[in-house]
Amino acid sequence: MKLRSIVPDADVSSYVHEIIVMEDDRLLQNMTIPLVAKGYPSIVFQSTRNKRRDAVAQLVLYGQNVRPFQLDASGDLLVIAYFLHPYLVKYFFDFNAREIKDLCIDIGVMRPAKSMNLVEQLVNARSLPARIQLMNDYVRKLSATSRGQDDKAIIWSTLEIVKNRGLVSLKTLQSELCITERTFQRLFESHIGVPPKLFRKICQFNAAFDQFSKGHYNRLTDIAYDHGYSDQSHFIRVFKEFTLLTPGDYLKRLPGN
């Protein structure tokens, strides 16, 4: 399976943190790809083709996930995932981010994707660059048609947590913003979808998981200490909390293993 990361174009980078593309035209059997907590909601185009070359495609929004998502794949697979900055769900889609925690919804039938006939255009596009351009156009249109306004407090505090890989004092952030704990909690639940303490924990785990998935370690203890866990057992407990698997079992379930 080909997996690549694409740097967003400058004019959409204020909305899109990262673009991930997964492609495989040789899936000989059905498979399940585990998607674990990352800290970013995502707009995802998913397309598969069966042996008759019939396309099954959809455009979905994945909310902030705590439990792992399972992506079922078969036939020819193409996944284009636009990971949005954590605070953008409410701004782009005008609903409380908490409502779609651990859920995904079909946004291909919603405006502006429906008015753009976006799913059909993505299916019929002849190249990945053409599909990326279509997705970029969609993000621009979401921004142009958004009803809400970005909240500077949630943007700043979210970026501070992400930048520090979750290793930051929430009380310090709250004090810097001169807001009450209750207001701070409400901001995170409505814009991010989870309380600030849980978001911080997700960011800490995601930084550790990134090191783990890239194999940049000799022992799990190295990852634990690099990312603020008390010891290896602590890291394994958190790993199981977010993936439902031990690190060893997770590696065994990855495609190709």
Image (cartoon, rainbow, N blue to C red):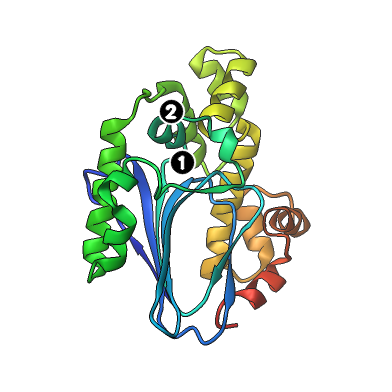
Residue at x-position 55% and y-position 16%: 175
Q: Residue 119's x, y, as percent? A: 34, 57
Quarter holding residue 223: bottom right
User: Taking 72 as reference, is 134 above or below it?
Assistant: above
Residue at x-position 61% and y-position 35%: 194
Query: From this viewpoint, is residue 193 visible?
Result: no
Residue at x-position 71% and y-position 72%: 249
Q: Nearer the viewer, residue 8 or 89?
A: 89
Residue at x-position 64% and y-position 75%: 253
- Residue 44, which numbered label? none
What residue is disc 1 on?
163
Using residue 139 as the reference point, say whether residue 36 is left or right of it: right
Quarter holding residue 169: top right
User: Taking 32 as reference, is 177 above or below it?
Assistant: above
What residue is disc 2 on?
156
Q: Nearer the viewer, residue 207 or 26?
A: 26
Q: Residue 61's x, y, as percent? A: 47, 48
Query: From this viewpoint, is residue 147 visible?
Result: yes
